[in-house]
């Protein structure tokens, strides 16, 4: 059975969140800003999609959270990758690269 567009988008968002957390812990807004920065503002993630993804990833044990203070001095929940999350990010990156290369090949031949 083919992957639905919603599954593809959810999986892509998961990968983007994991990638945004690769180098350091970030709070939700920081994750959103990092994704925008890495995408050079070619796409944006809205909070209505981001926060359910963070909850889902934490339940799966791919990220963990702890409370801290933001740059503005406010209480914020900071997220970081777990070892399992780092392995998942590496695996999903390889899958995405293969998928992307396949689509590019098809588009060039079409």
Image: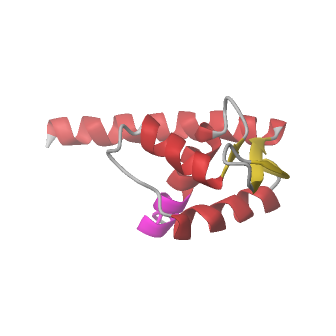
**Colouring scheme, one of rainbow, by chain, secondary structure, one colour:** secondary structure
The range drawn in magenta is 2-10
Q: Is residue 59 left or right of residue 28?
A: right
Q: Is residue 36 left or right of residue 20?
A: left
Residue at the extreme left: 110
Q: Position of residue 109 (x, y in %)?
A: 16, 37
Q: Is residue 66 magenta?
A: no
* Residue at image point 76% right, 42% down: 80
**For the point 64% across and 68% down, which residue is it?**
52
Nearest the eye: 25 or 100: 25
Residue 62 seen in this snapshot: no
Q: Main secondary structure of the magenta part?
A: helix
* Rendered location of residue 74, percent (x, y): 74, 55
Image quarter for residue 102? top left
8 drawn magenta: yes
- Looking at the image, is 92 positioned above or below residue 4? above
As drawn, the residue found furthest toward the top would be 23
> Dividing the image into 4 quarters, which one contains the C terminus?
top left
Q: Is residue 60 visible?
A: yes
Percent from the top left, x then y, of residue 20?
59, 39
């Amino acid at each position: 059975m083919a992957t639905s567009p919603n599954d593809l988008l959810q999986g892509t968002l998961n990968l983007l969140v994991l990638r945004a957390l690769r180098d350091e812990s970030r709070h939700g807004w920081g994750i959103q800003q990092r994704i925008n920065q890495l995408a050079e503002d070619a796409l944006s993630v809205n909070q209505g999609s981001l926060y359910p993804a963070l909850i889902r990833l934490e339940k799966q044990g791919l990220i963990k959270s702890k409370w801290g203070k933001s740059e503005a001095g406010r209480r914020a929940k900071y997220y970081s990758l777990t070892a399992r999350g780092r392995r998942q990010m590496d695996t999903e990156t390889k899958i995405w690269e293969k998928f992307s290369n396949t689509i590019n090949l098809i588009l060039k031949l079409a």
